[in-house]
């Protein structure tokens, strides 16, 4: 099983009850924030797994602290980054710009965490600050289905320099990321992808399960209010 979504823990739970061995890719990542659904999924999946396949060294320590035997944890690298590098020649930024009539210079934003988009008031605050970014640079937003209704209701597309797109496929999305002047997100994986691509990333969260993107990468944690100054 891969990652930290609901299907990850669902598959791990079913497999464990059927006595089918479970291997968890991205094991041991921790935000230490149990209000995040993904953190609950990660912790429970690791406890159910026979093999914990780890993408970063600190994750082995997290697993050991939670009582996972050392022999079950293996540092194997990062398949998501392997996929990105394998497709590097396919990410055609110019093609994506032309297909969606995007400006030469833009900030790409994508938000989907419950803490940022589920409550209408919070979504409205996010839109206000994204409009502040748009006062300085065009903002391209492939809108995630989870937050679409609240963000549009808050007037996301009312700013003339905000370009709202339908969700993009993997190749086109990473091409858009690659061509961005910066990325604003609350995604976990995108923190790693921007680090590899060398694109500045502003993560609108108080924590991250991928601290290596801050210590060795291009990522910064910010609040809504810090988006424009950043």
Image (tube, rainbow, N blue to C red):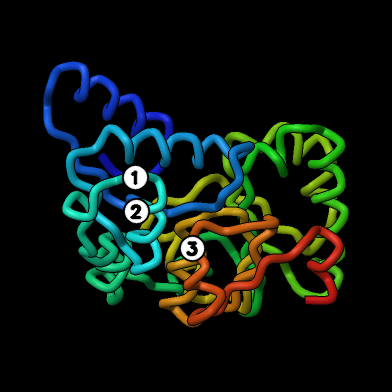
The CA distance from mark 2 to mark 1 is: 5 Å
Image: 103 above or below 32: below
| First in residue order: circle 3 vs circle 2 | 2
Report which residue position mark 1 lands on. Answer: 67
Marks 2 & 1, CB-CB < 8 Å contact: yes
Identify which residue is drawn at 16% across, 53% down: 71
Marks 3 & 2, CB-CB < 8 Å contact: no
Report which residue position mark 2 lands on. Answer: 64
Q: How crowded is mark 1: few (under 14 residues within 10 Å), some or many (20 or more)?
A: few
In this rendered view, identify the residue nearer to me: 66 or 223: 66
Q: Position of residue 79 (x, y in %)?
A: 26, 60
Q: Position of residue 220 (x, y in %)?
A: 65, 72
Q: Position of residue 213 (x, y in %)?
A: 50, 72
In this rendered view, identify the residue nearer to me: 209 or 166: 209
Report which residue position mark 3 lands on. Answer: 210
Residue 6 visible = yes
Label total for image: 3
């Amino acid at each position: 099983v891969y990652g930290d979504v609901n299907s990850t823990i669902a598959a791990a739970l079913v497999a464990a009850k059927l006595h089918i061995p479970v291997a968890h890719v991205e094991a041991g990542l921790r935000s230490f924030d149990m209000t995040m659904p993904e953190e609950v999924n990660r912790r429970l999946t690791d406890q159910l797994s026979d093999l914990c396949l780890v993408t970063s060294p600190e994750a082995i320590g997290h697993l050991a602290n939670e009582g996972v035997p050392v022999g079950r944890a293996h540092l194997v690298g990062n398949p998501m980054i392997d996929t990105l590098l394998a497709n590097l020649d396919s990410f055609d930024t110019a093609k994506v710009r032309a297909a969606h009539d995007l400006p030469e210079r833009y900030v790409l934003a994508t938000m989907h965490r419950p803490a940022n988009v589920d409550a209408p008031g919070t979504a409205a605050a996010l839109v206000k600050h994204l409009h502040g970014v748009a006062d300085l640079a065009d903002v391209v937003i492939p809108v995630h289905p989870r937050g679409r209704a609240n963000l549009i209701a808050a007037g996301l597309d009312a700013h003339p320099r905000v370009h709202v797109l339908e969700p993009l496929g993997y190749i086109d999305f990473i091409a858009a990321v690659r061509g961005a002047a910066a990325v604003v997100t609350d995604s976990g994986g995108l923190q790693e992808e921007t680090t590899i691509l060398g694109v500045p990333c502003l993560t609108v969260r108080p924590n991250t399960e991928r601290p290596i993107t801050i210590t060795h990468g291009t990522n910064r944690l910010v609040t809504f209010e810090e988006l424009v100054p950043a």
